[in-house]
């Protein structure tokens, strides 16, 4: 698996999330939890959308991403700072923590 870097920051125009420098697709084709966009640092529909998008890009499996997004949101996405960076390895570590709980 090729390692990727995911990053998020809040700007004057809203939240920006990228994967290897390109905008991260919102995964709304799999499920739309919100029309507002991505958010993080709390539990809710916008962080859930981010969790789904991160997992869909990382795993490449829509069913697995949907199944895991709730726990990943609560354990990883809800804990992210205003500006953050996650590698593929850190996403895997977060998934292991989800499985352990």
Image (cartoon, rainbow, N blue to C red):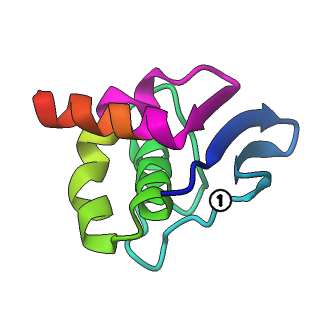
Q: Which residue position is annotated with label 1? A: 24
Residue 68, placed above or below residue 73: below
Q: Which residues are magenta?
A: 73-91
Residue 95, placed above or below residue 80: below
Residue depicted at x 39% and y 30%: 76
Residue 60, placed above or below residue 85: below
* In this rendering, position of residue 73 left or right of residue 57: left
Location of the C terminus (image quadrant): top left
Residue 23 image offset from top left, x and y in percent: 74, 59
Residue 7 occupies quadrant: top right
Residue 69 image offset from top left, x and y in percent: 31, 50
Query: Given the current orientation, which residue lies at the most extreme bottom position?
Result: 29
Query: Given the current orientation, which residue lies at the most extreme right position?
Result: 12
* Secondary structure of the residue carrying numbered label 1: loop
Residue depicted at x 77% and y 43%: 14
* In this rendering, position of residue 63 left or right of residue 23: left
């Amino acid at each position: 698996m090729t390692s990727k870097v995911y990053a998020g920051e809040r700007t004057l125009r809203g939240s920006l999330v990228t994967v290897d420098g390109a905008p991260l697709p919102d995964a709304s084709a799999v499920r739309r939890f919100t029309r507002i966009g991505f958010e993080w640092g709390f539990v809710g529909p916008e962080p859930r959308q981010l969790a789904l998008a991160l997992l869909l890009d990382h795993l490449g499996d829509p069913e697995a991403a949907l199944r895991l997004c709730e726990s990943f949101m609560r354990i990883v996405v809800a804990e992210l700072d205003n500006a953050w960076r996650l590698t593929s390895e850190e996403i895997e570590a977060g998934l292991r923590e989800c499985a352990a709980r």
